[in-house]
Amino acid sequence: MKDIKIAKLIEAEEKRQREGLELIPSENYVSRDVLTALGSVYTNKYSEGYPGKRYYGGQENTDIVEALAIDRAKELFNGDHANVQPHSGAPANIAVYQSWLNLGDTIMAMRLDHGGHLTHGHPVTSVSKAYNFVRYGMKDVETGEIDYDEMRAIALKEKPKIIIAGFSGYTRSLNYDKFAAIGEECGALLMADMAHVAGLIAGKALPNPLDHGFQVLTSTTHKTLRGPRGGLIISKGIVGNSLKAPEKIIENLPTLIDREVFPGYQGGPHMNNIAAKAVAFREALQPDFGVYAKQVISNAQTLAKALQGKGFKLVTNGTDNHMVLIDMPKSFNGVNGREAQEILDMIGLNANCNAIPDDPLPPYRPSGLRLGTPAITTRGLNEEHMGLIAAWMHEAITKRNDQNALAQIRAAVTEFSLQFPLPSDR
Ligand code: DSN
């Protein structure tokens, strides 16, 4: 590579990833094949449109790549239709909103401090200005159970046109049947933003909302699904209906969504990314991906217990998925989530600070520390290693003012991490 500065920075990032452990629950390590597709000449190609109907020439290969990605995504999630063009999760969510709603319509989504995502209507986002958001949340933060009675009452009063099941900071299972019953009663489209758990659904370690009355799934492709950074929409409905102004009914979802992604919201798809998505979907269709998905959850549950054994206080007291949320001030007096994140960075364990329910602290220095096991499970760690991670975390936070102690833990983390090569190094 001729750009020495960037080449050195790529090497530095490879070293950082090899010598540390990634505990951010929304990150993962992709395979060499995914990286190869991502870095391929498909990045040179414009392909506005869809397979068989493009606005540029030279599509004899791109059409096959995108059709493969679509077929594999449909097979993975048992959908009637897949759109693999969204550049990431936020554009996927916005495309669904715009395909189904009129400006000012109501969407019901999880309370943001209970784990909901920015694109589910955080006041700082543009979608919050376009639509009216109403909320559901946990009845009890000790168990994480959603208050379905309150959710139903609000839904019947506010009549949302979309109800979203999904989160980026919630550690328990959602009861999709209860969502579906409420959605049916108030006439809402049921959308699951499965970005965090897509790989766990694909690996059949968690239920698929489409099997429980939902009509649309949106996702990123780079979290538990272990693909390139990107977005995805799966839906029910009839494919191949090319109406110019389709009526907003379930049968027309594939057409409504396709028209909204392109030309409604995005321009040219990123074909290198779609090729990499196709590779990742094929990997996720292999039987060993199911083993991986179950291991991710088992590792998270073992890590949660090990952390509790060291005195960490967890929001919802445990986890049903890949993620653990620590209430830092309740665990260590005087240490907030950001300080904990910075201490862990010093020892080569990467996690991220996150709001907790009714957080008294501001978003940039919140109380929570969010951890997850998708990436370390890809590295090959299993239950027997989770106690070590909890012990390093506890020691580093306890001895946070002792630079020698931190350096010793950092050396131990590096030595340990190098025993588990990145998949792209194997
Ligand atoms: N930023 C992602 C996460 O970390 O959960 C969600 O978009």
Image (cartoon, rainbow, N blue to C red):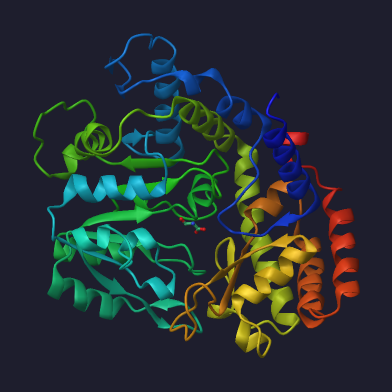
- Quarter-wise, where is residue 340 in the image? bottom right
User: In which quadrant is the N terminus drawn?
Assistant: top right
- Look at 38% across and 12% down and name the residue there: 59
Residue 319 lies, with reference to residue 227, above or below; the image says below
Residue plotted at (47% across, 74% down)? 363
| Residue 215 shows in the view | no
Q: Where residue 389 sits in the image (x, y, percent)?
A: 77, 66
Which residue is at the front of the view, 125 or 166?
A: 125
| Image point (71%, 45%), residue name | 13
Q: Is residue 399 above or below residue 62?
A: below
Residue 88 sits above or below residue 38 on the image: below
**In screen coordinates, is 131 left or right of 347?**
left
Measuring from the top left, give residue 108's x and y in whole percent.
Answer: 25, 66
Q: Position of residue 408 (x, y in %)?
A: 91, 67
Residue at (34%, 45%) from the top-left corner? Answer: 92
Instruction: State the quadrant of the C terminus.
Output: top right
Q: Give the x, y percent position of residue 130.
A: 19, 58
Q: Is residue 189 visible?
A: yes
> Splitting the image into 4 quarters, where does residue 255 fall?
top left
